[in-house]
Amino acid sequence: MSRAHALLSASAAHRWIPCPPSALLQEKYEDEGSEYAAQGTSAHSLAEWKVRRLLGDIQPDPRPDLTYYDQEMEDATEQYAAYIAETIAEAKKTCCDPCVMVEQQVDFSRWAPEAFGTVDAIVAGSGHLWITDLKYGTGVEVSAERNPQACCYALGCLELLDDLYDIDLITIQIFQPRREHISKWTVHKDDLMKWAEETLRPAAELAAAGKGDFRPGDHCRFCKARHECRARAEQQMALTRYDFKLPATLSDEEIEDILRQVDHLVSWAEDIKAYALESAISGKHWNGFKLVEGKSVRRYTDEEAVAKAVQADGKDPYERRVLGITAMTQLLGRKHFHEILGGLVEKPRGKATLVPESDKRPAIDFTDSTDFNNEEEKGE
Ligand code: SF4
């Protein structure tokens, strides 16, 4: 179940809409595979199989061939299939024969040249369309509201189904089981079309032609050009106007300006360091720099032989520790974990963090006297 990639893919719309020339630029770089992406692919294959099974379409069990599979994936995809079943039941309230499509390729090239994407699950009833996107990752909580990827999918679905189901409303559902997060957003077709004409089409035309302005932002961290992009570098270097003054000599306004940009600056600097190191390992020479070995720690060459030697000496070489929460969740599965250990897990208050006003988390209530936690999750 491989997924083809378009130049203007829905999954990268969050990047190429604000920064159109980034689309063509990606062609210069190799695909960056990752363990997380491979894990997501396995989860999607299993989820697809389970939803098809739910619909009576019995396919060979993919589990033996999955690169990644564990109890957590089993449970997460089970929850996802149950969620799709609920969505179908919702559609059946107003439509006796809703249409259900799984891993469906949709085309939104009416607005973006040669653009298409693959939707995890589509349910269409009379006047209403539901699009569900399974996000298996845990890194960032994804919101359905004005989500460019899902909006592109919605347009592709309308191309397929609007004539048959006369759709007025589109509900976008992001299902992120490993963060226990579901986000839903309903948009009227006219509003979606307005966005498609006023935002998507102009950005797509520029992107396909490699034109438009380079606009750095949060989306840069998913861009293959992030290490070398001049616009991103210039934006970060703009902070040097403060000339590394000590905080006490800066005005409140200057500190607020730095706070607004400092996370981008740190992530950009880390990207540059990682890129330079990788190039140096591949043979590139950077003037004034050399590769050296970092610190290393001693390790056993053969753990079994070590255990035997210590046992022969009459001592116990093993320590017994309870698995951390992540490893225990993988062992038991999320549902069973909650059943037997739910009452034994607590979530202390998180470390205080200064974030922009636009952040969705509520501001700290200082009348609540519980202490903040400055430690990482225990047992991880
Ligand atoms: S790094 Fe950012 S600004 Fe530069 S091309 Fe990529 S998305 Fe655009």
Image: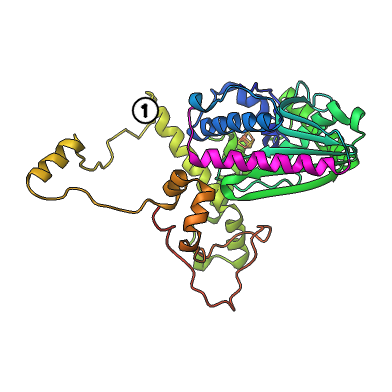
Q: Residue at x 60, y 45 (%)?
A: 177
State yes or no: residue 218 in magenta. Answer: no
Mark count? 1
Q: Ligand 1 appears in which quadrant?
A: top right
Which amino acid is tagged 1?
A: Ile
Q: Residue at x 62, y 29 (%)?
A: 49
Q: Residue 130 in the image: state x and y as whole percent.
A: 79, 39
Q: Residue 120 in the image: state x and y as whole percent.
A: 69, 32
- State left or right for residue 63 relative to residue 314: right
**Vertical comparison of 59 with 176: above or below:** above
Dominant SS type (magenta): helix
Q: Nearer the viewer, residue 136 or 110?
A: 136
Say few, some or many: other residues with alpha carbon within 10 Å of mark 1 (under 14 / 14 to 19 / 20 or more). Answer: few
Q: Residue 325 in the image: state x and y as whole percent.
A: 44, 52
Residue range of the region highlighted in magenta in the rendering: 67-94
Q: Nearer the viewer, residue 230 or 338?
A: 338
- State left or right for residue 341 relative to residue 62: left
Considering every residue shown, the one lying at the far left of the view is 313
Does any portion of residue 215 appear in the rendered image? no
Instruction: Tell me which corner region of the image, top left, top right, bottom left or bottom right, holds residue 43.
Output: top right
Q: Residue 189 in the image: state x and y as whole percent.
A: 88, 39
Disc 1 target residue: 281
- Display colour scheme: rainbow
Q: Residue at x 59, y 48 (%)?
A: 238
